[in-house]
Image (spheres, grey):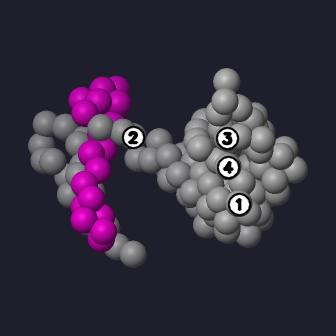
């Protein structure tokens, strides 16, 4: 994998990332840091990546298990250290998995497999942060 990140130039802290798969991401800093709030903060993108990586795993595991999953939302909350480097020290992922007759044990297993074996993002972040999770199941028929 690869990515090229380019600064927007003087007068701000905006950066544009071009991913190896051909997608563009906008990043910017807070106004207090010289940014103009025109894109996501780079550290927010780490949380987004963790949620996307783990959500992908959960959906794939449930689907392969022939469970009728129709939706998955992952709310990710991160706490950072107070001093530089301000690494994440705690990350919590809350999954809302929607489907028909989803067994709680299957959802728990999918989340555990993601956390322990498959999600490279959360496993990497767990080197500096305590990663926890919770979930709820929403019935697609309601």
Tag in front: 2 or 3: 3
Return the residue at label 2.
41
Q: Pick the quarter of the image with the C terminus.
A: top right
Rate crowding at label 2 as few (under 14), some (14 to 19) or many (20 or more) other CA atoms within 10 Å: some
Residue 25 visible in the picture: yes
Give me the C-alpha separation between circle 3 and circle 4: 5 Å
Q: Which secondary structure, mark 3?
A: strand
Q: Residue at x 20, y 57 (%)?
A: 6
Q: Position of residue 28 (x, y in %)?
A: 30, 39
Residue 66 marker = 1
Whether 22 is among the magenta residues is yes
Q: Within the magenta stretch, is there residue 109?
A: no
Contact check, label 3 and label 1, Cβ < 8 Å:
no
Q: Earlier in the sequence, mark 3 or mark 1?
A: 1
**Secondary structure of residue under mark 4:** strand
Identify the disc placed on residue 99: 3
Which segment is the magenta one? 18-38
Q: Marks 4 and 2: CB-CB under 8 Å?
A: no
Depth check: 19 or 81 in front?
Answer: 19
Place of residue 126 in the rendered image (x, y in percent of width and height, measured from the top left): 70, 58
């Amino acid at each position: 994998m690869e990515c090229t990140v380019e600064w927007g130039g003087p007068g701000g802290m905006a950066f544009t990332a071009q991913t190896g798969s051909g997608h563009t991401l906008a990043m910017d800093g807070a106004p207090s840091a010289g940014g103009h709030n025109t894109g996501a903060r780079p550290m927010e993108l780490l949380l987004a990546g963790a949620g996307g990586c783990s959500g992908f795993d959960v959906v794939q595991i449930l689907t392969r298990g022939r469970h009728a999953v129709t939706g998955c939302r992952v709310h990710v909350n991160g706490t950072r250290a107070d001093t530089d480097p301000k690494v994440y020290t705690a990350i919590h992922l809350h999954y809302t998995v929607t489907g028909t007759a989803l067994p709680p044990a299957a959802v728990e297993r999918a989340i555990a497999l993601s956390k322990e074996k498959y999600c490279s993002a959360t496993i990497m972040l767990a080197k500096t942060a305590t990663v926890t999770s919770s979930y709820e199941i929403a019935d697609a028929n309601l």
